[in-house]
Amino acid sequence: MKMVQLPNLSRHRAFTLVETIIALNLICWLIIIPSIDLGQQWQIQQEKLFLLKFQSNWNWSLKRAFLEKSNCVVEFNSAQHIITFRDYRPQTPNVNLTLPKTLNASLKRNNKLTIHADGSVEPTTIYFVSQLTKRRYTYTVQKHWGRLFETQT
């Protein structure tokens, strides 16, 4: 009987399964990364963060006006893209929120809202329109209580 000699497998260089998976993973990422627009995603997150800050400052102003018995004015400056929460007492600083470039704000009536010392507010509607996603965020201010009701379209 003649012995069949198998070739020495250690001399043949080839990819192992782990190396193949890593290489395929890198190739897939190189294909996917250019298709993701990270700048647009960052701007969308900035809009969402701004809306959360606006709601937080609104609620804080309502509570402060009621508890400290002082008026608070919310001014919308669309030319400078700034919303100011102003308390007219000297020891209280103003809070300025800068709108993202892709977001516009407007009120239904004028550019000022007054939160009275008893916590009451005139009913109105606040609009934020995103140029990026074409969404319209509508905040309706509840008569007297000042609670914000949000709707998106």
Image: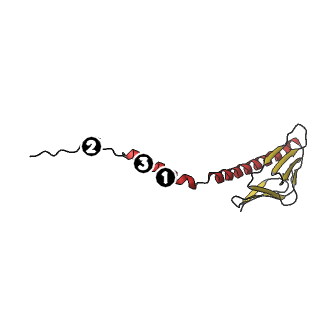
Point out residue 40 in the picture as x, y percentages from the top left corner. 65, 54
Image vertical order of residue 93 relative to residue 108, above or below: above
Q: Earlier in the sequence, mark 1 or mark 2?
A: 2
Q: Earlier in the sequence, mark 3 or mark 1?
A: 3
Disc 1 target residue: 28
Identified at 48% across, 48% down, the residue is 26
Closest to the camera, between mark 3 and mark 2, is: 2
Question: Does residue 18 appear left or right of residue 130 in this picture?
Answer: left
Point out residue 11 in the picture as x, y percentages from the top left corner. 28, 41
Disc 3 target residue: 21
Question: Does residue 5 appear left or right of residue 111 in this picture?
Answer: left
Label 1 Cα neighbours within 10 Å, binned few <14 / some 14-19 / many ≥20:
few
For the C terminus, the image quarter is bottom right
Label 2 Cα neighbours within 10 Å, binned few <14 / some 14-19 / many ≥20:
few
Label 3 Cα neighbours within 10 Å, binned few <14 / some 14-19 / many ≥20:
few
Identified at 78% across, 48% down, the residue is 98
Question: Does residue 136 appear left or right of residue 2 in this picture?
Answer: right
The Cα–Cα distance between marks 1 and 2, rounded to whole angstroms, is 30 Å
Kind of element beneath mark 1? helix
In the rendered image, the residue lying farthest to the bottom is 153
Point out residue 81 in the picture as x, y percentages from the top left corner. 80, 52
Identified at 53% across, 54% down, the residue is 32
**Which numbered disc covers residue 9?**
2
Mark 3 vs 1: CB contact within 8 A: no
Image vertical order of residue 70 relative to residue 125, above or below: above
Please name whichever residue, 146 or 54, is drawn nearer the observer in this view of the structure: 54
In the rendered image, the residue lying farthest to the top is 91
Q: Amino acid at mark 1?
A: Cys
Q: Earlier in the sequence, mark 3 or mark 2?
A: 2
**Quadrant in the picture for residue 93:** top right
Kind of element beneath mark 2? helix
In the rendered image, the residue lying farthest to the left is 1
